[in-house]
Amino acid sequence: KEAEIGYSIISTSTKYHRRSNRTRVLSMQFETSLKLNLRMRSQGRTNRWVVMSLLCLTACSDAFLTLLPAGKITLDGMNNHVLYQQQNGNDASMRRAVIETAAGFPIAVMSALCFPSFASASIKDGPIIVIGAGGRTGMEVTKQLSKMGLTTVTTTRTGKDPFQIVKLKDEVKEKISHYPDPVDVTSIESIRDALTKTQSAGVIYCASASRQGGTSFQIDDEGVGNVAQIAKDRKARFILISALAVDRPESKSFQITNTIGGNFNQIMDAKMSGETRLRKIFGASGDYMIVRPGVLLNGKSFRGAQDLEINQGDTIGGGLSRDELAGIVVGALLSDKKAVTFEAYRTSTHQKLQPEFDSKSGLEQHADSYLDFFGSLKTDT
């Protein structure tokens, strides 16, 4: 519960009036220190100095705060700065507050310390593009990205904005924009245009076969290869959502899913082929991760990351909700791991995929937050 509170409030924008400037900035500093507190706790490190440093640094905040008229402060932990918006009637001008000021300095220092394991600076330099954002999984991933403070661009095969009529909180919606042109993953030119025009630093592939959108081999195989090639050319980080049991053709999970028919026919074969394409394109040390989720369950997460287990070797399966999958995907994007494939499911649904497998692989991993799952994962061979 504490982790969920810490990771949700850290990305919020705080509105304030002059009489409450100090209270609001102190509140943001507390939120930042809480996030650092949680990360340090997970690493087994003491955190008393955080509170002491915070008290010392905030003692001189009043001098800066008295200069601020009514407006809005936004804590941007991803980019390690404070944004201040001054309101003049109907006209609002935005400027970046100097982080060396009494208010900005402790926030900037602590927010920088909160994210020691982010993959690369490029993730923070450009937007994250979601391929296949029109589906339920794509929409959940988009919302999770924006909640983490990442600028996000949605794409769909029709060009229709998936969030056009969906009500979102202002602090979530302001991070999301839509690429207006249809994006066809079977067309190299279409993909190149989308990634070039949006200057994307990261790509999350949520697209899959559908009744109207293409067959499994078009979307889950050829499409993955096309997007992976352009992502590599542009030096963008690539996260692929695949499926658990794709390389266990003798398992019931594989056989049932692979024989649905229609555009979904042989979808597990297509996903396995798509994974192989991706690994071949990026190479042994490529900037990619493959997430293999279990069965997608209805409903929402109860405790977030704490309910989940990740694994490797594709011997253990289970299920998870779409918002849990979205958390795992964004955590993978922000991790420093490369060339890694792993499975994800709720711990309570843990079961071996085939009778002859052991009930535990010995590679199970658990964490208190989505950002802390990936430290011990093995790279693909």
Image (cartoon, rainbow, N blue to C red):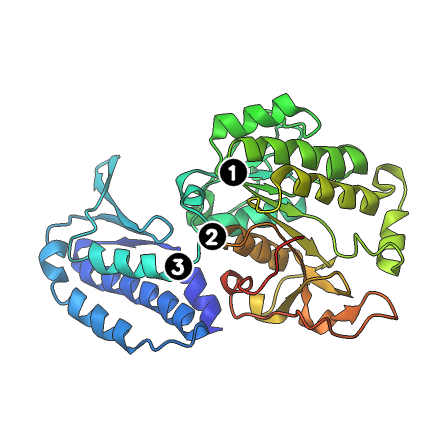
Q: CA distance from mark 3 to mark 2?
A: 19 Å
Query: Which of 286/60 is in front?
Result: 286
Mark 3 residue element: loop
Residue at the top extreme of this rendering: 189
Q: Is residue 156 visible?
A: no
Question: Are there few (<14), some (14-19), or many (20+) residues within 10 Å of tag 2?
Answer: many
Mark earlier in primary sequence (3, 2): 3
Mark earlier in primary sequence (3, 1): 3
Query: Which of 166/103 is in front?
Result: 103
Q: CA distance from mark 1 to mark 2?
A: 21 Å
Q: Is residue 84 visible?
A: yes
State the image quarter where residue 227 is shown.
Answer: top right
Amino acid carrying label 1: it is: Ala
Dot label at residue 147: 2
Residue depicted at x 68% and y 24%: 187
Dot label at residue 116: 3
Dot label at residue 236: 1
CB atoms of marks 3 and 2 within 8 Å: no
Of circles 1 and 2, the one toward us is 1
Q: Where residue 220 sits: x, y (%)? A: 74, 39
Q: CA distance from mark 3 to mark 1?
A: 20 Å
Mark 1 residue element: loop
Mark earlier in primary sequence (1, 2): 2
Q: Where residue 98 sits: x, y (%)? A: 19, 47
Q: Where residue 310 sits: x, y (%)? A: 64, 64
Image check: 130 left or right of 314? Answer: left
Query: Which of 211/279 is in front?
Result: 279
Residue depicted at x 71% and y 59%: 298
Question: Are there few (<14), some (14-19), or many (20+) residues within 10 Å of tag 3?
Answer: few
Amino acid carrying label 3: it is: Pro
Q: Where residue 106 sits: x, y (%)? A: 23, 61
